[in-house]
Image (cartoon, grey):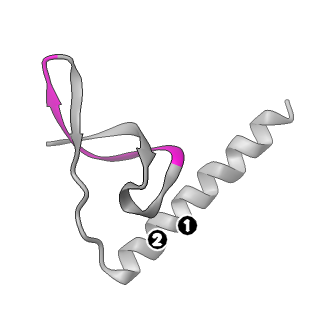
Amino acid sequence: MISSGVFLEGEYGQSDISLVVPVTIGRNGWEQILDFKLSDEEQATFNKSADAVRAMNDVLKTL
């Protein structure tokens, strides 16, 4: 297991965004996203981080 930036499609309650999450790595790159159950506090913090990434992406679209 290692943390890596991958495109999420529902894992950790997020979709259509690339974030760093734990994954298993194989010979051809990441193989599986490890979708751990987060506490309510951890999930709220993760969601806040995702919102910050989305806000930055929106800013970058204006450049």
Total numbered labels: 2
Residue 12 among those drawn in magenta = no
What amino acid is found at the position of numbered circle 1 in the picture? Lys
Q: Report the Cα–Cα distance between label 1 and label 2.
A: 5 Å
Magenta region: 16-27
Q: Residues within 10 Å of mark 2 (few under 14, many from 20)?
A: few
Q: Position of residue 18 (x, y in %)?
A: 48, 41
Looking at the image, residue 2 lies above or below residue 36: above
- Residue 22: give x, y in percent of width and height: 25, 48
Q: Residue 63 location in percent, x, y?
A: 85, 30
Residue 37 locus on image (x, y percent):
25, 70
The residue positioned farthest toward the right in the image shown: 62
Question: Please, what is the dominant secondary structure of the magenta stretch?
Answer: strand
Residue with the mark numbered 2: 45
User: Hey, which residue is sitting farthest front in the picture?
Assistant: 9
x 37%, y 82%: residue: 40
Q: Secondary structure at mark 1?
A: helix
**Residue 35 relative to residue 20: left or right:** left
15 left or right, relative to 36 = right
In the rendered image, the vertical position of residue 45 relative to residue 35, given as above or below: below
Q: Which residue is depicted at the point 86% across and 35% down?
A: 62
Q: Are marks 1 and 2 in contact (CB under 8 Å)?
A: yes
Label 1 crowd (10 A; few <14 / some 14-19 / many >=20): few
Q: Amino acid at mark 2?
A: Thr
Residue at point 69%, 42% (across, down): 57
Residue farthest to the top, as pictured: 28
The residue labelled by disc 1 is 48
